[in-house]
């Protein structure tokens, strides 16, 4: 660090750098398989990252503004997903106690956000360079405004990422006063379905409480899976059908994988307590694992209903049945095969996505 850098900013950057190195080490084995299986797809996505800024200049200003805002929100997504690694709860609680001026805190948040935005800025530069070198006819009149729009979206993402870091360090609100419990609150009421009651208390509610973001994460992934499936089946223009099939298939598998991992982690936390309880917990655990299948099956059911409404003949095609069967087998394997190693599980997820993408790309052929 330069000697002029304030010690607080240097500390924040060093903590963030260490957290990013730990994250990269934990993802090393996974990224090897993903790059090996989907290297060309990743390169294609990298070349597309600057495209929204150029396309926005061909749209009316309300639509262009919406595209740029959506691009900025997606660009600052890594800061939101990694905020716990960059600022663990214990570290954030300690940093709040330091007697520092707000301006210095904001400068540190900007520096940490810049550490995240630098790789994305390089990706934007490479993608924009590729498009400018290809120079398609529609791009030539809007090249300069498109570059300005891309830079603006990146700077807006940097600002939003800094706000995310600042919110992470914000002093939590004091707990609201609650009414004193009445005697009826202590009365025992036998639940009608004990397994469902325990699943709600031990798995559903903890995913929404305090700093746990599993509930929000799964809701966002489910919404993304439904949106990508809708875009694929409706054949959204300007986007290749194979790419839409890849997005729909990937979101379907990822929402299942992340949900199952969250359930497995919660089971690991609860295992010592459950073993000490004077009741059988196997039913509750099976119900929790089965519940992680519901988002994928909900997406497949919604896709079947939509496909029946827009093109009933498509349901009779062989490729549709093969896709549905393959998707069901893939999500069941992800949830049911509990003894897979981390590397084998990543391979299963990647192969499932590629297989579904290859099958789905033939739907509209």
Image (cartoon, helix red, strand yellow):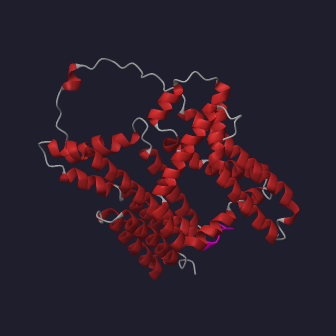
In terms of depth relative to the viewer, which is nearer, 120 or 136? 120
Q: Is 245 placed left or right of 182 in the picture? A: right
Residue 61: x %, y % from top left:
79, 50
Q: Quadrant of the N terminus?
A: top right
Q: What is the magenta segment's predominant secondary structure?
A: loop
In terms of depth relative to the viewer, which is nearer, 104 or 254? 104
Which residue of the protein is positioned furthest toward the right in this rendering?
Answer: 141
- Viewer can see residue 193: no
Which residue of the protein is positioned furthest toward the left in this rendering?
Answer: 278
Per the image, is 40 magenta?
A: no
Is 104 above or below relative to 35?
Answer: above
Residue 266: x %, y % from top left:
32, 47
Which region is colored magenta?
A: 235-241
Q: Is 19 placed left or right of 107 in the picture? A: left
Q: Identify the residue at image location x=66%, y=28%.
A: 104
Is 98 above or below relative to 320?
Answer: above
Q: Identify the residue at image location x=57%, y=46%.
A: 17
Q: Identify the residue at image location x=76%, y=67%.
A: 130
- Viewer can see residue 15: yes
Residue 309: x %, y % from top left:
51, 67
Q: Quadrant of residue 304?
A: bottom left
């Amino acid at each position: 660090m330069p000697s002029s850098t304030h010690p607080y900013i240097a500390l924040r950057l060093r903590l963030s750098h260490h957290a990013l190195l730990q994250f990269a080490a934990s993802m090393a084995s996974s990224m090897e398989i993903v790059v090996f299986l989907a290297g060309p797809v990743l390169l294609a996505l990298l070349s597309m990252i600057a495209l929204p800024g150029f396309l926005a200049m061909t749209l009316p200003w309300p639509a262009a503004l919406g595209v740029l805002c959506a691009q900025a929100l997606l660009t600052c997504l890594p800061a939101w997903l990694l905020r716990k690694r960059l600022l663990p709860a214990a570290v954030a609680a300690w940093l709040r106690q330091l007697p520092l001026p707000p301006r210095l805190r904001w400068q540190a948040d900007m520096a940490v956000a810049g550490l995240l935005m630098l790789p994305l800025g390089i990706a934007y530069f490479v993608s924009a360079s590729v498009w400018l070198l290809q120079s398609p006819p529609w791009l030539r009149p809007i090249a300069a405004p498109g570059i300005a729009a891309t830079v603006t979206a990146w700077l807006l993402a940097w600002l939003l990422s800094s706000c995310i870091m600042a919110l992470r360090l914000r002093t939590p609100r004091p707990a609201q006063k609650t009414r004193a419990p009445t005697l009826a609150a202590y009365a025992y009421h036998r639940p009608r379905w004990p397994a469902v009651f325990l699943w709600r208390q031990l798995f559903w509610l903890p995913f929404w409480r305090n700093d746990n973001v599993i509930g929000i994460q799964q809701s966002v992934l489910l919404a993304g899976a439904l949106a990508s499936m809708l875009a694929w089946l409706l054949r959204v223009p300007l986007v290749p059908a194979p790419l839409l099939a890849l997005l729909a298939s990937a979101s379907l598998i990822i929402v299942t994988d992340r949900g199952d991992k969250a359930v497995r982690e919660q089971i690991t936390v609860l295992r010592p307590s459950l073993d000490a309880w004077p009741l059988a917990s196997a039913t509750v655990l099976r119900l929790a694992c089965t519940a992680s299948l519901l988002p994928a099956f909900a997406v497949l059911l919604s896709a079947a209903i939509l496909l029946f409404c827009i093109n009933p003949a498509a349901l009779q095609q062989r490729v549709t049945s093969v896709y549905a069967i393959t998707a069901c087998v893939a999500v069941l394997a992800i949830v049911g095969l509990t003894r897979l190693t981390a590397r084998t599980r990543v391979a299963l997820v990647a192969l499932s996505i590629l297989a579904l993408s290859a099958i789905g790309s033939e739907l509209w052929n």
